[in-house]
Amino acid sequence: MSKNAIVSFKGNKDINAEIALTGSKSESNRALIISALSGGLISVGNLSDAVDTVTLNNILKAIREENDPDTFFSVDVGHAGTAMRFLTAYLTITKGMFHLTGSGRMKERPIKLLVEALRELGAEIRYAGQEGFPPIDISKHFAQSSRKVKIAGNISSQYLSALLMVAPSLPLGLSLEIEGELTSRPYLEMTLSMLEEAGISYKWEGQTIHIDHQPFESCNLIVEPDWSAASYWYSIVALADHGSISLPHLKERSLQGDSRIRDIMVPFGVRTSQTANGIALKSGTSVAIHEVLNLKDCPDLAQTIIVCAAAKGLNLSFTGLETLKIKETNRVLALQQELAKIGVVLTEDNEVYTLNCKQLSFPEKVTFATYDDHRMAMAFAPLSLFIKEVEMEDYQVVEKSYPDFWKDLEKAGFTVKEI
Ligand SMILES: O=C(O)C1=C[C@@H](OP(=O)(O)O)[C@@H](O)[C@H](O)C1
Ligand SMILES: C=C(OP(=O)(O)O)C(=O)O
């Protein structure tokens, strides 16, 4: 049974705290797959506490412990998109027969392009439900028939990352041609950097990435703290009267594209400095933003930035939000519905999304729905700096990527009471 919580902030809006963020969910899930592919040669440090990572880790362990290739294995990833996509490719080349499924929402998140690419390489995969969507059945037979595969880049970079991680283990290697524009590019670059750290060489020529069949090298993949989680602290500092937050171990130069939050938040009045121990955020002066913000490279920051801009009454425009519709929920619709509760309208016109904050107002109490989406809860929580009582529905939803989010808010002076 899901539970709600009342989130509030009393006193002056002066915030001062040190917050130790959990490891990046994206880096962790790649590290787990790469380690599994290396046959244990590669170890992983500072793994994320995210439920998505715990789920993937448990699945990989259970598969490793089962050594009868004729056992039919049923695997449930819950809400974890990367786990679904990465496992689809990983299980294709793993001995055994697998039924791969997930939550109700996962069955609405497309997987067709990845399945088609794997079939082209020689995989036998069947849809066990609706064509193009999980659940899928993966047979034990895989004989690579081709090295080349083409895939559209505009739906999800996770398909490409999934293919690239298994590439060194494919007998013929892989030449992956990206068709059209590429969404979430930093995530693809993260995959290649982590493969490189694991001893894998690649060539990126024009639209094609080539990886030959090659062995992994022994190493320890250390996961950095999660920059997407850091984004909620940027929002809090941007909305507080005075904010000073230190985030240990976070590095400005990061594999994570969401580290762009640092530059995006400068005009929102948040200054970042590198310290001996990590980074420090401080509130400063805001400046007007005239350009349209393109979030194609960092879709997971969209909710943080849009809600923060709305609360500041900024009529900003955004592009690059198309993939938000196929994430944990239709995030565009969810934002529209919840922003309406503070009088803000988010319109969509030909892939340009614009905030209209003319009627912005903060009622004494607002109940926000979270749509099974951790980022809805975390993006709207900072509004408790303006709204006396924020009731957050199904507040534990944050555990997907940042289980300690509410505890950390309490450290910074917020009150979080389960009801
Ligand atoms: O590869 C990854 O770790 C991720 C890629 C992105 O997805 P898309 O490539 O589907 O945009 C991002 O939204 C997701 O949270 C994590
Ligand atoms: C989209 C996300 O995750 P996934 O696609 O891995 O479910 C997210 O964490 O915002």
Image (spheres, rainbow, N blue to C red):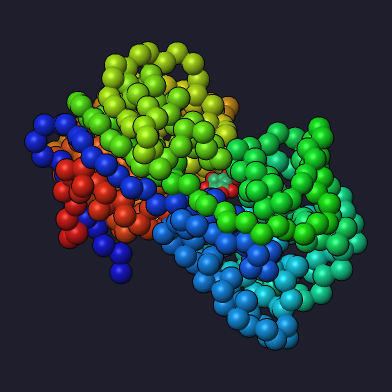
Mark count: 0
Q: Quadrant of residue 122?
A: bottom right
Q: Is residue 341 left or right of residue 139?
A: left
Asked where in the image residue 334 lies, by quadrant, the reply is: top left
* Residue 176 in view in this figure: no
Which of these two is toward me, 223 or 335? 223
Q: Is residue 142 left or right of residue 365?
A: right
- Expressed as whole percent of the image width and height from the top left, the position of residue 301 reads 45, 37
- Pinpoint residue 335: horizontal percent, then vertical percent: 40, 40
Q: Position of residue 287 (x, y in %)?
A: 35, 14
Tell me the residue at 19%/52% (across/down): 416
Q: Position of residue 232 (x, y in %)?
A: 35, 39
Rendered view: 330 above or below 286: below
Quarter the N terminus occupies? bottom left
- Depth check: give the residue in front, 141 or 249: 249
Residue 329 higher or lower than 87, as above or below: above
> Along the line of sight, which residue is nearer the eye, 334 or 209?
209
Q: Looking at the image, which residue is at 27% across and 24% down?
A: 283
Judged left or right of residue 139, residue 357 is left
Which residue is nearer to you in this view: 309 or 105?
309
Residue at the image position 53 percent from the left and 67 percent from the top:
57
